[in-house]
């Protein structure tokens, strides 16, 4: 363990493990945003991952680390998780690639198109209960009774190290980076990037962006310990959900590596989504637009700085995109 709770060596090790699964994504300068903010603004395109989001890095690293430590036989019963979103897709994809059986537990309320998308990646979908909590109870049962291994969405050092590989790439592609602006939910993404960046270039600021409502990490940092919040609808649905009241890893890590923390409104997210599509030709989901939303809504002073925005994923439907367009008044 490093002073930041996650060693640089663990992140380099993750990079070696996932090299053939996750893409080393481009860091592209935006001329329009650079001119407008009088800064050097770059976009880190995690939307280029084969699953459309960065979560593949963490899932692939944890699976490969398990195989390395315990051998393939130990994974014969397979891996399991309960996410409908980018994490579920990442686990299904990484497991298929590594030829490990995967079960994704989903509530009966999850729409059939989402179920079909996960099945198409080769995972077994188990539809159970009427809520995410009931789906989680099934995950726990499969772990207990069938010896399956849970791949958590953020709160595991192997998952966080995988997300940290983004930080290594940022430091290589822009060694003088002044600031990285990162969407924040469970904290695997910000914690991993922050651990890598602070180890290599401590002067680089790490700015976290949370939602205004239902932001578990924001409320937990304020309280000084993990707290539960009520989940609310958001354009940035990938930023919803809690951090776990028994959080073991990301809460402390985020507290150590994050320099500043802002919240963004739905309106600002909508405007940023539309702008990234219209001006940058980047199709992103709400969670991936919060960095730009924060710069616009809070007037973050980035003049003269080299700034990276993490475009974390592209899982957005036409309906949601249209809702954003209307909300942005475009
Ligand atoms: C999961 C996710 C995030 C937030 O990552 P955490 O590790 O939970 O903080 C941001 N953007 C997208 C697209 C995601 O899927």
Image: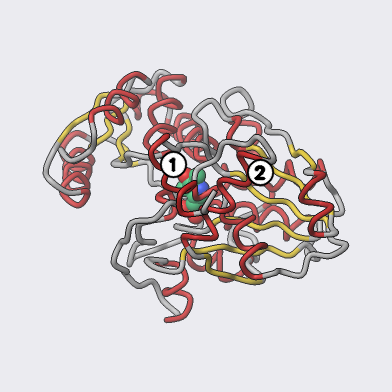
Q: Are marks 2 and 1 in contact (CB under 8 Å)?
A: no
What residue is shown at x 17% (from left), y 49% (from top)? 131
Q: Which mark is residue 3?
A: none
In this view of the protein, which residue sits in the foreground, 82 or 319?
A: 319
Q: Position of residue 57 (x, y in %)?
A: 55, 37
In this view of the protein, which residue sits in the foreground, 95 or 73?
A: 95
What residue is shown at x 51% (from left), y 68% (from top)? 252
What residue is shown at x 81% (from left), y 42% (from top)? 172
Q: Position of residue 256 (x, y in %)?
A: 61, 70
User: Taking 266 as reference, is 272 left or right?
Assistant: right
Mark 1 CB near ligand 1 (8 Å cut): no
User: Taking 61 as reference, is 227 left or right?
Assistant: left
Which residue sits furthest left? 129
How many other residues sit within 10 Å of disc 2, few (<14), some (14-19) or many (≥20)? many
Q: Position of residue 39 (x, y in %)?
A: 84, 57
| Residue of label 1 | 322
Label 2's element? helix
Do we see residue 158 in this rendering? Answer: no
Q: Position of residue 213 (x, y in %)?
A: 40, 68
Which mark sits nearer the N-terminus, 2 or 1? Answer: 2
What residue is shown at x 54% (from left), y 60% (from top)? 268
Report the Cα–Cα distance between label 2 and label 1. Answer: 30 Å
How many other residues sit within 10 Å of disc 1, few (<14), some (14-19) or many (≥20)? some
Question: Quadrant of residue 197 in the image?
Answer: bottom right
| Residue of label 2 | 166
């Amino acid at each position: 363990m490093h002073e930041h709770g996650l060693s640089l060596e663990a992140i380099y090790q993750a990079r070696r493990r996932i090299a053939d699964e996750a893409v080393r994504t481009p860091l592209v300068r935006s001329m329009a945003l650079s001119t407008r903010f009088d800064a050097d603004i770059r976009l880190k395109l995690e939307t280029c991952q084969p699953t459309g989001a960065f979560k593949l890095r963490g899932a692939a690293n944890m699976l490969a680390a398990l195989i390395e430590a315990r051998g393939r036989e130990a994974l014969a019963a397979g891996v399991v998780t309960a996410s409908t979103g980018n994490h579920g897709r990442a686990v299904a994809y990484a497991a298929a690639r590594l030829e490990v059986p995967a079960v994704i537990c989903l509530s009966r309320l999850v729409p059939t198109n989402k179920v079909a998308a996960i099945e198409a990646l080769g995972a077994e979908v188990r539809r159970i209960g009427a809520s995410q909590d009931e789906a989680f109870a099934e995950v726990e049962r499969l772990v207990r009774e069938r010896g399956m291994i849970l791949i958590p969405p953020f709160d595991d050092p192997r998952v966080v190290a995988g997300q940290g590989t983004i930080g290594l790439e940022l430091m290589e592609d822009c060694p003088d980076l002044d600031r990285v602006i990162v969407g924040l939910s469970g904290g695997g993404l910000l914690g991993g990037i922050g651990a890598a960046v602070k180890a290599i270039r401590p002067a680089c600021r790490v700015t976290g962006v949370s939602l205004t409502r239902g932001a578990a990490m924001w409320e937990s940092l304020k309280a000084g310990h993990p707290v539960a919040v009520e989940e609310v609808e958001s354009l940035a649905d990938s930023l919803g959900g809690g951090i776990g009241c028994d959080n073991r890893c990301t809460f402390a890590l985020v507290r150590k590596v994050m320099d500043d923390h802002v919240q963004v409104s739905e309106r600002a997210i909508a405007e940023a989504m539309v702008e990234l599509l219209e001006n940058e030709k980047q199709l992103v989901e709400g969670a991936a637009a919060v960095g730009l939303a924060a710069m616009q809504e809070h007037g973050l002073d980035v003049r003269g700085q080299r700034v990276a925005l993490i475009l974390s994923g592209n899982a957005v439907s036409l309906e949601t995109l249209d809702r954003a367009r209307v909300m942005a008044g475009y």
